[in-house]
Amino acid sequence: MHVFEILVLLHVAFGATGLIAFWVPIIARKGAAAHRKWGRIACYGFIGAGILAILMALLSLYGPEKRLPMITDRVLFNGLFGWMMLYLGLLTLGFADYGLATVKHRANRAALRTPRYQIIFAIVAIAALNCGLYGLSIGEPLMMLVAFIGLVAMGTQLRAIWRKQLPRGAYVGEHFRALLGMGISAYTAFLSVGLIRLIPDQVFNPLIWAGPSIIGVSMIIYFTIQANKKLARTQAAKR
């Protein structure tokens, strides 16, 4: 068994764990034991899958073997399964790290401004720009779209970190959006690994790749609106 095949199996194991566990904290009562337990399991599963996605992307780009010879368009292959996969792996790690950090440092937001976290933001932003520019160079709008989504998400998180003041409890929304973003990037990367083996003729179908982003962003918008309404009602009641 080749190294790449071993990485795929490990990626599937970690990814499946994260994908299954991911929905428990979404459904469970926020802050409850089940929410915390399964949230950590989902994060660690996605972190493992993200690291493996990065390794697979690097092997696809620089490995000694020609990966997936049934794919004839190697330029597009390098884009989607190389640079975009590398970016999605880093984005998954960035979202998971930030999602956990918002809870860990909820009483000390300044801790998120340290190099420990800012370097991760910079790495993800560089990967997003590289993905988007490569997509622009080959005329692949999907790569540009996912890069744009990631940059907007990183910018939103940095804005929350560096703002002088945030409403009390704002970390809950940041935590929720980060972990939903983690799910989006992980689902997209995870789909690509199985997609090329199950239905290789649809591997470059943009609707399939964009599916997790459409669903995830819709959920983020919905829950953000609901959270803002709840916060507004709370503030109005205090007046």
Image (cartoon, rainbow, N blue to C red):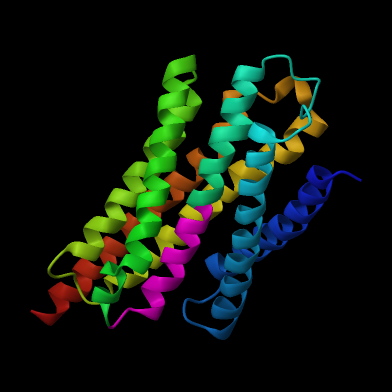
Q: Which sits in the foreground, 7 or 33?
A: 7
Q: Which residues are magenta?
A: 92-107
Figure check: 198 above or below 167: above
Residue at 56% in and 42% down: 86
x and y percentages locating residue 4 in the rendered image? 79, 43
Q: Which image quarter: residue 43?
A: bottom right
Q: Residue 51 falls in which quadrant of the image?
A: bottom right
- Chief secondary structure of the magenta span? helix
Residue 212 percent coordinates (x, y): 56, 42
Residue 105 x/y as whole percent: 34, 79
Please say whether residue 97 is one of the residues in the magenta stretch.
yes
- Depth order, front residue of 221/199: 199
Looking at this view, name the residue that lies furthest to the right.
Answer: 1
Residue at image location 66% in from the left, 48% down from the top: 55
Residue at 81% x, 20% y is 70
Q: Is residue 113 visible?
A: yes
Q: How far across and down, in percent of the image, does residue 224 sit?
A: 33, 57
Q: Quadrant of the C terminus?
A: bottom left
Location of residue 61 with respect to 48 vertically, above or below: above
Q: Is residue 188 magenta?
A: no
Left or right, 145 with reference to 7: left
**Residue 207 appearing in the image:** no
Between 7 and 25, the one lying in front of the other is 7
Considering every residue shown, the one lying at the far front of the view is 64
Write down the quadrant of residue 128 in the picture.
top left
- State the count of labels: 0
- Seen in the image, is 123 located left or right of residue 83? left
